[in-house]
Image (tube, rainbow, N blue to C red):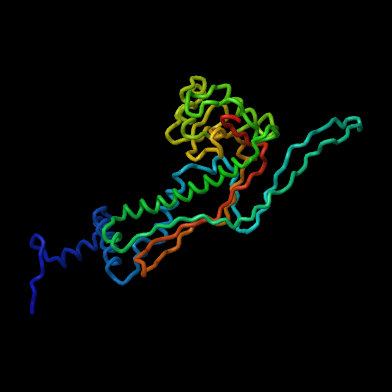
Amino acid sequence: MNFEEKRLNGIPISHLAESLSQDPTWLKSKYFLNFKEKQIAKEKLYGTQSNTDLQSTTEVLAQIVKGYEAYGNVDAWVRPFITDKSVTYIPVSSTGSAVDITTGSGVFTNQPMTVGYRAVTNSTEIGSNVVWTRGYAEDASFDAFAMQNEDAGIAIKRKVLADVLTLIQACSTGSGVGSATVTGFQNWSGSAPLFSQILGAISKVDQSGYGPATHMLLNTDQYWLIFDNEKMTSTLYAGNDIKQGTISTTLGVDFVKVDSLSGSTANQKDYAIALNKDKAVALVTRRGLTVEPYERPETNSYGFVASMKIKPVILITGSICRCFTGA
């Protein structure tokens, strides 16, 4: 039986398709690329391939990394280390003193020395998953998948940030060297902190001999309240985009908004942490973000698992100053 071939504006479809397939302008056009993507997805969805093939692992990883990097730049205020070993040794040194040896009578009483090493056993694995059902895959667009993947990256970064802050907040709050109680900042949800209180927190690290402070972490409330202080705003560099959550100042200190800053008791809620990023915390990455397909046909579950091996460690507590409402 002969069938008459379909035509478009009088041109046989097969001829039109052949002509377009040889046209480089058409093949690079946005319309064709979008059409091609949808057709490939449709064939994979209703064909014999796995549901996890809806997106390549490389594409998913790129979307997860995008979410991870978009949420807070922890690396800006910690000392990052990358290793492939299960145990990492991080040297921590202090600065000694010099004496006059012109006459030969000088005695070295405090030589530069290495305080020691921080041994980090990095078996900590942080992960998040992206899961969908076949029905969801049939109805959702690729934008929905991208949003899920980026959210997984954000979830992992939030966990990394929470682990770092938990470690800092576990430091002693005594009046000894480092992690010292700083008076002031008494208004947890009230007026903006005084400029003198901000400077006091910054200088505390310097006074301990591990300064100057390079960063001050603030909870969301206090981050926005500092802009109510005229002296504080006069230190801002032009071009700061305050809504990004990080501002640079002429004080030589960057102020960073973190949304999970709180204490263990109601009257000791941390709302500011001043630190020297080179001496306070190390963030050791043993394995960066990786993605693996996830399938459980018996429960109609498909997706990906993203994970990484990363662990924070305190280097020198004296380079950290916690600020809270007081005893």
Q: In the displayed structure, does residue 298 sit left or right of residue 190? A: left
Residue 24 visible, this orientation: no
Residue for point 58% across, 51% down: 311
Q: In the displayed structure, does residue 193 sit left or right of residue 51? A: right
Along the line of sight, the residue nearer the viewer: 63 or 202: 202
Residue for point 48% across, 56% down: 127
Along the line of sight, the residue nearer the viewer: 86 or 267: 267
Q: Quadrant of the C terminus?
A: top right
Q: How many marks?
A: 0
Residue 42 visible, this orientation: yes
Residue 143 image point, x, y percent: 31, 52
Q: In the displayed structure, does residue 175 sit left or right of residue 227? A: right
Along the line of sight, the residue nearer the viewer: 184 or 127: 184
Residue for point 51% across, 35% down: 256
Location of residue 268 (image quadrant): top right
Residue 103 image point, x, y percent: 91, 30
Q: Quadrant of the N terminus?
A: bottom left
Residue 272 image point, x, y percent: 55, 33
Using the image, determine if residue 187 lies above or below residue 152: above
Location of residue 254 (image quadrant): top right
Can you name the residue that lies furthest to the top here?
Answer: 230
Residue for point 9% across, 60% down: 9
